[in-house]
Amino acid sequence: MISSQLTGRRLWIAALVVPPIAFMCLFLVYPILSAFAYAFYEWHGLARGDFIWFDNFHRVLFEFPFSERTINAFKHNIFVFFALMVLQNGLGFILAYCLWRELWGARFHRIAVFLPVVLSTVIVGLLWKLFYHPLFGAVNATLRAVGLGSLAQPWLGQDSTALTAIVVANAWHMVGFPTLVFLAGMQRIPSEILDAVRMETESEWVKMSKIVWPLVAPSATVVFTLLFVGAFNWFELPFIMGGVDGSPHGATDVLGLYFYRTAFGSTSASAENFGPGSALAVLIFLFIAVVSSVITIRLRKREIQL
Amino acid sequence: MRKSVESNTFRTFGWDGLIQILLIGNSIVMLAPIVIMVFSAFKTNAQIFQSPFSIPDFTNVKSILRVWNETDFLLYMGNSLIVTGASIALILILGTMAAYAIARYEFRGSGLILLFFLAGLTLPLKLAIIPLFIQMRDFGLIDSRLSLIFIYVATGLPTTVFIMTGFIRSLPNELEDAARMDGANEARIMWSIMLPLVRPAMVIAAIQNVVPIWNDFFFPLIFIQNNNLKTLPQGLTTFMGEFGTDWGVLFSGLTLSALPIIILYIALSRQFINGMTAGAIK
């Protein structure tokens, strides 16, 4: 009696957990493990050839023209990461502080700052592409309207500004996310601590740098790590705004675009090249995994448990 | 003494004023692009170029009607609804099943299973797109909505299991025990006693998944070539190419695509904000 009840219970638990685990294995774990294996094979179109050890890795890292493009794209990813760190996370922290004061209208401002976050990257990219249009775009129209017409330029059309222009569109799209994560962190600071600080000092700067910033460290860890992963996975916005080749002249090329082009072909070279593509994917994956673990562990250390 | 209090209030007022100005300025920057987009949907090319910021004549719906009648906008919208709806339903069913088992029963390996799902949180599936492509081709799922649905379920499950497990654990045992005393079987306890209590967590999990799935562009780009199956973000890029010179139509297309989610967000802003930041806030 008892044993049959036990097997019944076991079957019931298995019926609950096996289907979701099967889904995860089939469409997440297995493809990711395969990605590692694929990088060590030669590929002819969609057909797998011989096992060739590290040849694919060698090609994307050290052989012309792959290596040059990899390094060019990688440099752009680094720029994107630091630029967004300032524009998105830095501004997000300042905005979170402003919202935290709960002045009149704070609820409205909170809803406004998060509104672009719910929009599709495609809509954001296409919209800003129209705004950046040299003659008819709203950005140059705004500059002309405030008397800065001399600054009007083809933002997406020249090497010097194209990547920054896309970064700005990204910051507009996503700044609400770090803002609200930081805000939630600030709201969790116990009021006794803040009262105690108010007795000690009147300086907002001391309060922010010595008390609030250390206490929102868990929020910072999450936001920094997510930004890092996002910046090195960056694909959709540059794809929409700069095109698959990272135009102009590769000025907006990033690893995600380069990987996509290598794997699935582009307008200029239309053949699939799964070998080097897989090698690139593995390298990006390892880079993200290693660096984001280091970032997380180092940032965790400065978090204070309350 | 009095003087110091006065200067103090002045200082706070000045500081608060500065903060208020910054917030208002930021909200203008956040909202202006969306307002210009909606305004431009009601303008002709000439009006957009000559007076980009003016309030339009809202009865001029010519561009909007062109998007509605001459493009596959409604088809794309329907496809997005089918894919998103099916994915969310499957995510909630499978996610609740796993979370319920992990949270309500003690069995060997339950910790390991939770860890397995949590590990999925960090895996960027985009980078495994080559094996996924070959796998889907072998399954005959290229140019099929199922390829998208299966991928979205696999990527959505980790956060869902994470949120639901935490919530289901926090539910009290008394009801469950009482039902068990009355001889109800486990399936019945789950279905009629526990699940009604889990609904709030389901809403959070649904919102957290609905935005990235509805907005996704990458996976349709790889798996869907048939125009009849394209989702809204993907269809939007096609249609922007076709109407490249008619800016009124372009802005109308963007406005119509953005409107459903904007309206939903304004109506449910608190749930959206909670849902979308739920994974990042401990």
Image (cartoon, rainbow, N blue to C red):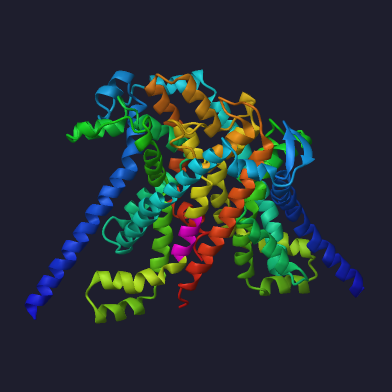
Residue A227 vs B255, above or below: the answer is: below
Between A13 and A285, which is closer to the camera in this rendering?
Answer: A285
- In the shown orientation, is residue A93 left or right of residue B137? left
Q: Where is residue B132 in the image (x, y as percent from the top left)?
A: 70, 41
Q: Position of residue A30 (x, y in %)?
A: 74, 49
* Residue A64 belongs to the span the image colors magenta: no
Q: Where is residue B136 in the image (x, y as percent from the top left)?
A: 73, 37
Residue numbers of the magenta segment: A219-226
The residue most toward the front is A63
State the image quarter where residue A178 is shown.
bottom left
Residue A175 in view, yes or no: no
Residue A173 vs B11, above or below: the answer is: above
State the image quarter where residue A160 is shown.
top left
Residue B11 in view, yes or no: yes
- In the shown orientation, is residue B6 left or right of residue A248? left
- In the shown orientation, is residue A240 left or right of residue A109? right
Q: Residue at x 38, y 32 (%)?
A: A156
Q: Which residue is drawn at 70% across and 37% down?
A: B133
- Tag count: 0
Q: Quadrant of the N terminus of chain B?
A: bottom left
Q: Which secondary structure class fits the magenta region best?
A: helix
State the image quarter where residue B127 is shown.
top right
- In the shown orientation, is residue A6 left or right of residue A266? right
Q: Where is residue A209 in the image (x, y as percent from the top left)?
A: 32, 70
